Amino acid sequence: MLYLRMNSPFIFGKIAKGNNFTNRAFEMKRLVANFDDKVNTILISPRRWGKSSLVNKSASLFKKEKNKYSVMIDLFNIRDEAQFYSYFAKKVIQETSSKPREWMDTAMSYLKRLSPKVSFPVNMTNDFEITFELRDKAEDFEDILNLPEKIARAKKIEIAVCIDEFQNIANFDQPLLFQKRLRASWQKHQETVYCLYGSQTHMMTTLFERKSMPFYKFGDVMYLSKIDSTYLTEYIVTQFKNTGKKIEPDTAKKITEEVQCQPYYTQQLAHIVWINTDKAVTSEIFERSLTELIEQNAPLYIKDTESLSNTQINFLKMLIESERKDIYAKELIQRYRLGTSGNVTKIRTVLINKEIIHLVNSRYELVDPVFRLWLKNIYFKS
Ligand SMILES: Nc1ncnc2c1ncn2[C@@H]1O[C@H](COP(=O)(O)OP(=O)(O)OP(=O)(O)O)[C@@H](O)[C@H]1O
Ligand SMILES: [Mg+2]
């Protein structure tokens, strides 16, 4: 007998595309309009809320029009400024050329002063590397940073440069100087528009909202929200239906509620429920899948808690159990042995910087909803 196995209609940990991308209509409209109008955008959210997927989708909508191009740059493994310039130049050249033969010419004609060295990795016809001899001179950096604008003018095109994991520039040797260089060049561009996005909300906010910082008022600052439960519920029901399985809207809604509508975990939990279901989801399947979700992610949470002090953990316990706004209430400080109110402030700051807690409607909450479930149902119970 032929055994046909259907693939799961849910994805997580990858860019959400096609059928897997749901809603975000409002955000997409705003982002594409910014690209069209050359308004720079800064997009900020905690990890895994869907920044990369949203920008990816918006950039592909933008470049559907003639003479519009997008350059997607991911800083996740870029460690220093020199690496950034090489990668930036390479991506800009690659994405705006129609054929590999043009790469060398483009590099030579725009970046000649920097004696670019172009090399082709073995067995790769569609990739290349470019390195420079950078002196510590402003014009050297400017040549590279102005590259997209120069190409856009020469080719009469418009370019959206999208830079993911932007918070990583904090690890560069001189992050402030680097930001000044970027800003000085990019603010003059007219045919190129920038979208800078990343997590670590606290740090990103400092980079873009503090008056003393180079990127202050660089553009439209967008705080991405989670996806509304209604859309996620509909999405789950449809994905089940399209693969010949059945889930009640109420159960689908429960999936979104357990993970507080966080897009990544919604997909992960829906995936586990789907795998565990033959024909129709039962409440037993739902409960078992929720346990599996927590167990699958537990190793991460164990590691996270190991890096926290006892008082930091007590503070999280206080947040989860009391669900109160006033973190300085005397009886809470006593019950959870948090020391002084000065201590509470310190704990709060550390946990915000680590992106473990954040402020939602003037109440501190755990950023990761499943970490919260794990602490509540397993860690604090044992
Ligand atoms: N529009 C969407 N519709 C459905 N699921 C989504 C959507 N956006 C994101 N997701 C889910 O969330 C996951 C994470 O999305 P994405 O990688 O875009 O987030 P991110 O904010 O860039 O994360 P990170 O901070 O880790 O870079 C995706 O793999 C997918 O499961
Ligand atoms: Mg991302």
Image (cartoon, rainbow, N blue to C red):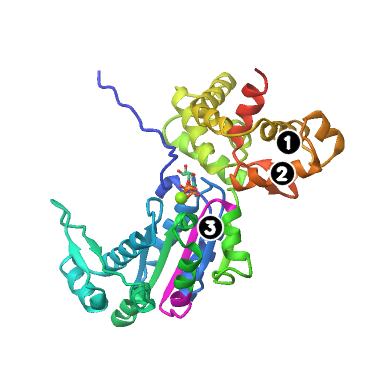
Residue for badge 1 = 319
Q: Secondary structure at mark 1?
A: helix
Please report the bounds of the magenta region as a residue range.
184-201
Residue at 33% in and 79% down: 150
Query: Within the magenta stretch, is there residue 196?
Result: yes
Residue for badge 2 = 364
- 18 over 119 or under it: above or below: above
Q: Total marks drawn?
A: 3
Which amino acid type is shown beneath numbered disc 1? Leu
Spatial CA distance of label 1 from label 3 is 34 Å
Residue 62 lies in quadrant: bottom left
Q: Nearer the viewer, residue 261 or 147?
A: 147
Q: Is residue 86 left or right of residue 303?
A: left
Residue for badge 3 = 25
Q: Nearer the viewer, residue 167 or 308?
A: 308
Q: Residue 171: percent from the left, percent from the top?
A: 46, 54
Q: Earlier in the sequence, mark 3 or mark 2?
A: 3
